[in-house]
Image (cartoon, rainbow, N blue to C red):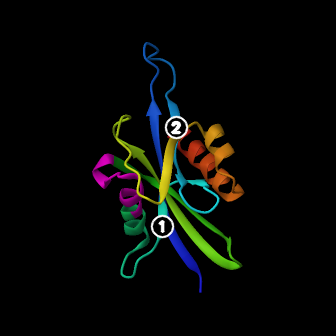
Amino acid sequence: MTLRACGLIVFRRLHAVGFASAPPQIQFLLLQTSYGQHHWTPPKGHVDPGEDDLQTALRETEEEAGLKSKDFNVLDGYKKEMIYKVNNKPKTVIYWLAEVKDDNTEIKLSDEHQTFRWLSVEEACKLAKYQEMQEALREAHQFISNK
């Protein structure tokens, strides 16, 4: 049996005050788990019976980060599927890309996480220790930069 989880790679664009011509800085939201090795990840979780993948991603983002679907826009054209092993069993994780509408949107963590950070792609890749996640973050950054 393949484990399946879905989530959102959440980002924001920060504009430098007084520098209208400067490109915005893209920052990704990572959450640090309060269990296990305290790894860093975007909000994600297992698919519940009767849910489709995107419903799972939206529900998990609200549960884990307090972000409701009205707080962000899911970008068309980006969907990342990763398959890797967890306890010698295959796990599929699917991510969509979502931009918060307000840079100051409040993050409200669940008990599953102990802290969060908004990070540049370089900083996010340093904290996200899994190569697949690092690649997903870099691909997402490239996708955003080309829009």
Residue under pointer 1: 45
* C-alpha separation, residue under disc 2 versus residue under disc 1: 22 Å
Residue at disc 2, secondary structure: strand
Q: Residue at x 51, y 41 (%)?
A: 117
Mark linked to residue 132: none
Q: Is residue 138 left or right of residue 13?
A: right
Residue under pointer 2: 27
Residue at disc 1, secondary structure: strand
The kind of residue tagged 1 is Gly
Foreground: disc 2 or disc 1: 1
Q: Residue at x 35, y 52 (%)?
A: 66
In reply to whether residue 20 is colored magenta, the answer given is: no
Residue at the outermost bottom position: 1
The kind of residue tagged 2 is Gln
* Image coords of residue 2 (percent x, y): 59, 81
Q: Is residue 75 left or right of residue 140?
A: left
Total tally of numbered discs in the picture: 2
Q: Magenta part of the protein: which range?
A: 60-71
Please identify the dominant SS of the magenta region.
helix
Q: Residue at x 41, y 63 (%)?
A: 60
In reply to whether residue 61 is colored magenta, the answer given is: yes
